[in-house]
Amino acid sequence: MHSAGAQSQHCDMGISAARAAVIPASVAPAPKPNGAPQRGMVWIPGGEFSMGSDHPDMADARPVHAVHVDGFWIDETDVTNAQFAKFVQATHYVTVAERKPSGPEFKGVPPEKLVPGSVVFTPPSGPTALDNVANWWAWVPGANWRHPQGPGSDLRGREDHPVVQVAWEDAVAYARWAGKRLPTEAEWEFAARGGLDRQTYTWGSELKPSGKWLANTFQGHFPDRNTAEDGYTGTSPVRTFAANGYGLYDMAGNVWQWCSDWYRADYYEQLSKARVTSNPQGPADSFDPDEPGVAKRVQKGGSFLCSDQYCTRYMPGSRGKGEPRTSTNHAGFRCVRSGSAGLRRAS
Ligand SMILES: [Ca+2]
């Protein structure tokens, strides 16, 4: 068990030199290159936007600051179980959760406990304190992407659901195989906003326009009673809920999505000192004050477990985090590819 990371797998799971430069004001969004490089990818024109959130509960997402991203391609959906299966079939890749745990963090763990497994949402039978994630997360031997909730579960009927139980390094391996990469946090958020400026949700300012759920989140009483008003207690097929303004699905809810950046709670504070930051790549190292000593990567988007009672991080400006070798059944990923053009200066 990746114990340290497992402790961090709650809903919002989730500087040195900022590798960023102030850009001139004359930089224009990149025009769409000719033709799509790969089926299922969408061109994001790039540009300057307001990144982050002023939400009072989200200190790590403050302050809202100006960021520019170049144009890039992004998968219109999360990577699905069917897509991940093709990768594994072609490469015989073995995910972290399918390997016997090893490494210094497991020193002293009895050998009989060093078996492959992963972290699974295991709701209690009744209301529970929300200050201890162990009340609803359990490490389950035999849980992995093929068996997202443990040995008794499988992927039948879930071929078009997002793959879950993938660690950050699994996502990176897939992306390399596909000729892609993980998005930076800035690219992900730019894409999630769908062309809207400073809106709370990927679709606008209202959580439930006309009383309708627009993302797969958690309704009822967290974590013990999931009423699934949106139709799903767990993951949903990737095109179930309406796409955002850029034609991207599930940029809110369903599953968290790994980004390439290291996570630091103070990174936005650092970036806010510049008038605008161009193509931030994340900090050079990680620091999470909630769990010092455990390096984490950024996750974005929230999941089917986010609710307004506990975790509202299905907002594009909010942030999540995860230990890179820890997988769960509510986190997956999608990939991007850089545009053929770099910065284009306005004439
Ligand atoms: Ca749901």
Image: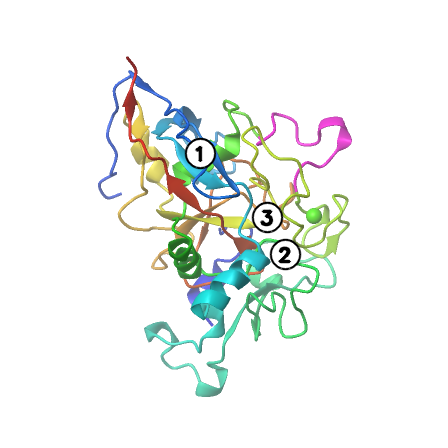
**Contact (Cβ within 8 Å) of mark 3 with mark 1:** no
Residue 74 position, x and y percent, is 46, 40
Q: Which mark is residue 35?
A: 1
Residue displayed at 45% across by 61% down: 167
Of pointers 1 and 2, the one earlier in the residue sequence:
1
Task: Give the residue type at disc 2.
Answer: Ala
* Label 1, ligand 1: CB separation under 8 Å: no
Tag 3, which secondary structure? loop
Whether residue 25 appears in magenta in the rendering, the answer is no
Q: Residues within 10 Å of mark 2 (few under 14, many from 20)?
A: few
**In the rendered image of this protein, does residue 184 appear above or below residue 139?**
above
Find disc 2 in the rendering and name its residue: 129
Q: CA gap, disc 3 to disc 1? A: 32 Å
Tag 1, which secondary structure? loop
Task: Give the residue type at disc 3.
Answer: Ser
Residue 93 in sight here: no
In which quarter of the view is residue 212 placed? top right
Residue displayed at 45% across by 31% down: 44
Q: Which mark is residue 327?
A: none
Residue 324 position, x and y percent, is 40, 59
Find disc 3 in the rendering and name its residue: 303
Q: Residues within 10 Å of mark 1 (few under 14, many from 20)?
A: few
Q: Quadrant of the C terminus?
A: top left
Of pointers 3 and 2, the one earlier in the residue sequence:
2
> Which one is nearer the viewer's eye here, 218 or 202?
202
Judge depth for marks 1 and 2 and give the one in front: 1
Residue displayed at 33% across by 35% down: 340
Give the residues drawn in magenta, as a range: 201-215
The colour scheme used to paint the residues is: rainbow
